[in-house]
């Protein structure tokens, strides 16, 4: 076989592969188009980001930023007050996002149950109001899952408030170990799995990355 012939053969092979690829992609596109066409309902969603891996709160804040970028109105409720103020707060407050942060609040080291319950209830009252406010398009409830797990806030109250919220309002809940009943009620649920985390290797939490 001459060089010319083998060049022609490999060109033919390439054409064949391209044609096969095009056919496969057309079939995929048809399926996706069908699904897009059949998804016609428009309403507010309940989104849960749970699991042990890093990326739950940042996902919630990312969605708030996305919504605000489109001119939607958002509010954030933070159920666990860390030792540091998170970077998203100053950025998003400047963009008009309201924040409710647990004042005396629950951190891993308060160990004062009565005080924690009172703090949780105080924030939950404000949270409930936001879930009744038609002018708010997106409500992020950061670390709400722990309040339910510790029974600082009644599960039934959370479910009721979520069910009765304005029809177009989006509700985002983050935190590990989300209660099954909230997962069942939600529209979109993601579980972030930890493969590894820098902290396991003795690297301390980094400003701008971890808070
Ligand atoms: P992030 O706020 O970075 O999105 P997260 O909301 O998924 O994290 P949380 O369980 O709320 O995670 O924990 C908050 C803090 O703990 C963050 O500083 C985060 O980097 C850290 N963290 C998250 N997952 C792990 C993990 N698997 N091991 C150790 N530290 C973690
Ligand atoms: Mg978090």
Image: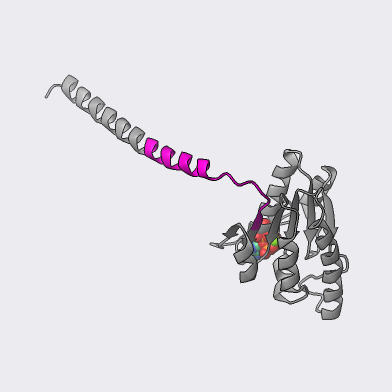
Comparing 136 with 69, the one in front is 136
Residue at the left extreme, as displayed = 1
Whether residue 148 appears in this view of the structure is yes
At which x and y percent is residue 75? Answer: 80, 52
Where the C terminus falls, by quadrant? bottom right
Residue positioned 71% across, 67% down in the render? 159
190, 45: nearer the viewer: 45
| Magenta region includes residue 42 | yes
Q: Can residue 177 be seen in this view?
A: no
Residue 47 placement: quadrant: bottom right
Depth check: give the residue in front, 117 or 156. Answer: 156
Q: Using the image, determine if residue 96 lies above or below residue 50.
A: above
Task: Tell me where residue 147 sits by quadrant.
Answer: bottom right
Residue 26 located left or right of residue 165: left
Q: Front-most of 2 and 89?
A: 89
Figure coloring: one colour
Which residue sits at x=72%, y=38%?
70
Q: Quadrant of the N terminus?
A: top left
| Residue at image location 22% in from the left, 23% down from the top | 7
Residue 12 sits inside the magenta stretch: no
**Left or right: 109 as drawn, with respect to 198:** right
Our reading of the magenta stretch's main secondary structure is helix
Q: Residue at the spot x=20%, y=26% of the render?
A: 9
Across the whole image, how many numbered discs are drawn on residues?
A: 0
Magenta-drawn segment: 25-47
| Residue 11 falls left or right of residue 187 | left
Position in image of residue 176 (x %, y %)? 65, 67
Q: What x and y, as percent, mark residue 106?
A: 80, 70
């Amino acid at each position: 076989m001459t060089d010319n012939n083998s060049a022609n053969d490999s060109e033919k092979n390439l054409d064949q592969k391209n044609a096969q690829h095009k056919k496969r992609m057309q079939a995929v596109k048809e399926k996706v188009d069908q699904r897009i066409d059949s998804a016609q309902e428009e309403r507010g969603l309940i989104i849960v980001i749970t699991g042990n891996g890093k990326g739950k709160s940042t996902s919630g804040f990312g969605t708030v930023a996305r919504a605000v970028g489109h001119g939607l109105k958002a509010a954030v409720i933070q159920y666990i007050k860390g030792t540091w103020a998170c970077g998203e707060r100053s950025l998003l407050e400047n963009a008009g996002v309201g924040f409710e942060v647990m004042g005396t609040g629950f951190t891993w080291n308060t160990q004062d149950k009565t005080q924690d319950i009172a703090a949780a209830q105080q924030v939950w009252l404000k949270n409930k109001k936001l879930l009744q406010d038609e002018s708010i398009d997106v409500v992020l409830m950061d670390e709400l899952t722990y309040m339910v797990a510790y029974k600082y806030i009644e599960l039934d109250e959370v479910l009721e408030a979520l069910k009765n919220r304005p029809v177009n309002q989006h509700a985002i809940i983050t935190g590990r170990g989300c209660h099954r009943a909230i997962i069942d009620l939600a529209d979109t649920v993601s579980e972030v799995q930890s493969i590894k985390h820098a902290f396991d290797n003795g690297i301390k939490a980094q400003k701008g990355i971890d808070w």
